[in-house]
């Protein structure tokens, strides 16, 4: 697969007079291709694809949400909120209505990711200064560990087939965050990147062959793509801004990301082929 930066004008959207979103912390392209789910200033929003236009807030104004993901049909989404001395994983409905509580934990849980069949959710669980990945089976409510290390793991994402999870990890001897691939059936973990840079926010392509992620290999963060076997590392963006939170169009022909500009965050989409 070859990649190029589109020559067409980038698609921008303003969320106010400043010309950008404030404090954007996640981005997810809906499986139907119609919407973008994103969090900014502690609220979870749904806007038109590919640039987040005409956003409407999904979560209540009195809750703080920094991360959300859509379910496989695009009609529901998951997010986590802190409540007093515990954390709650919720499922909300794009059409509206009361959210459904999926899991409650005294340990800090964050960064949920939904499997392609909608039956499992990967979570980051933090206890005593370390984080591990856990898998929640929605049917049974069972939560089981996927990693048990003294290190840190973050931002999991399922492969389209549901057999793999890619994640970022800060492991022993590593100078910064790297990417790892976990096979669910065996529990084996393969390291995809090994470098002194900040590799973060990995997302599988719809065909499962590529992984897009943020990396500051030039000093400023760009979006890169790499094959699932660790080969073919290629820059996807090359600019002076921080580019983060990559997410694929369901067709795989475009890759969206957020870019931190002087007037705030903007959501851009560029073509792939």
Image (spheres, grey):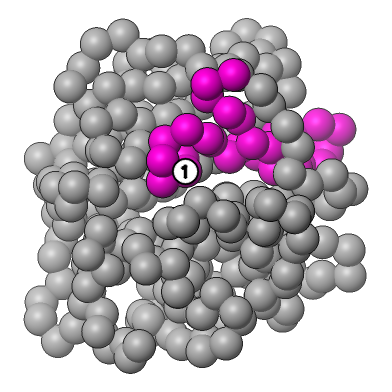
Instruction: Write down the region rendered in magenta.
Output: 114-140
Give the x, y percent position of residue 245.
42, 58
Q: Is residue 237 visible?
A: yes
Q: Residue at x 86, y 33 (%)?
A: 128
Find residue 155 and report its horizontal and vertical position in percent.
Answer: 57, 50
Q: Residue at x 68, y 65 (%)?
A: 180
Please tell me whether residue 143 is drawn above or below residue 239 in the rendered image: above
Please give the name of the residue rendered at 69% of the width and 52% of the height, measured from the top-left corner: 185
Q: Give the quadrant of the N terminus.
A: bottom left
* Residue that badge 1 annotates: 115
Instruction: Kindly state the secondary structure of the residue where label 1 is placed.
Output: loop
Residue at point 27%, 22% (across, down):
93
Q: Is residue 68 among the parts visible in the rendering?
A: no
- Looking at this view, is 106 or 196 the one in front? 106
Above or below 52: residue 4: below
- Which quadrant would residue 216 be assigned to in this image? bottom right
Observer-nearest of 132 and 208? 208
264 or 184: nearer the eye? 184
The answer to if 200 sits in the magenta stretch is no
Q: Is residue 139 magenta?
A: yes
């Amino acid at each position: 697969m070859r990649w190029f930066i589109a020559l067409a004008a980038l698609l921008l959207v303003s969320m106010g007079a400043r010309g950008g979103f404030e404090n954007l912390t996640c981005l997810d392209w809906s499986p139907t291709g119609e919407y973008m789910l994103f969090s900014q200033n502690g609220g979870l929003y749904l806007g038109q694809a590919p640039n987040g236009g005409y956003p409407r807030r999904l979560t209540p104004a009195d809750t703080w949400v920094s991360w959300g993901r859509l379910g496989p049909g695009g009609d529901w989404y998951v997010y986590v909120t802190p409540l007093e001395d515990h954390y709650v994983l919720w499922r909300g409905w794009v059409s509206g209505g009361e959210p459904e509580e999926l899991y409650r934990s005294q340990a800090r849980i964050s960064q949920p990711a939904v499997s392609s069949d909608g039956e499992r959710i990967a979570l980051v669980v933090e206890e005593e200064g370390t984080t591990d990945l856990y898998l929640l089976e929605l049917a049974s409510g069972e939560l089981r560990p996927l990693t048990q290390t003294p290190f840190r793991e973050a931002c999991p994402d399922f492969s389209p087939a549901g057999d793999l999870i890619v994640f970022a990890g800060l492991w022993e001897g590593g100078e910064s965050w790297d990417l790892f691939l976990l096979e669910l059936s065996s529990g084996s973990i393969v390291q995809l990147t090994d470098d002194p840079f900040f590799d973060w926010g990995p997302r599988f392509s719809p065909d499962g062959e590529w992984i897009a992620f943020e990396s500051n290999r030039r000093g400023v963060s760009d979006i890169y793509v790499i094959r699932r076997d660790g080969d073919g590392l290629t820059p996807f963006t090359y600019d002076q801004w921080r580019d983060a939170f990559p997410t694929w169009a369901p067709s795989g022909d475009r890759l969206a990301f957020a870019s931190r500009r002087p007037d705030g965050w903007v959501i851009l989409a560029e073509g792939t082929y």
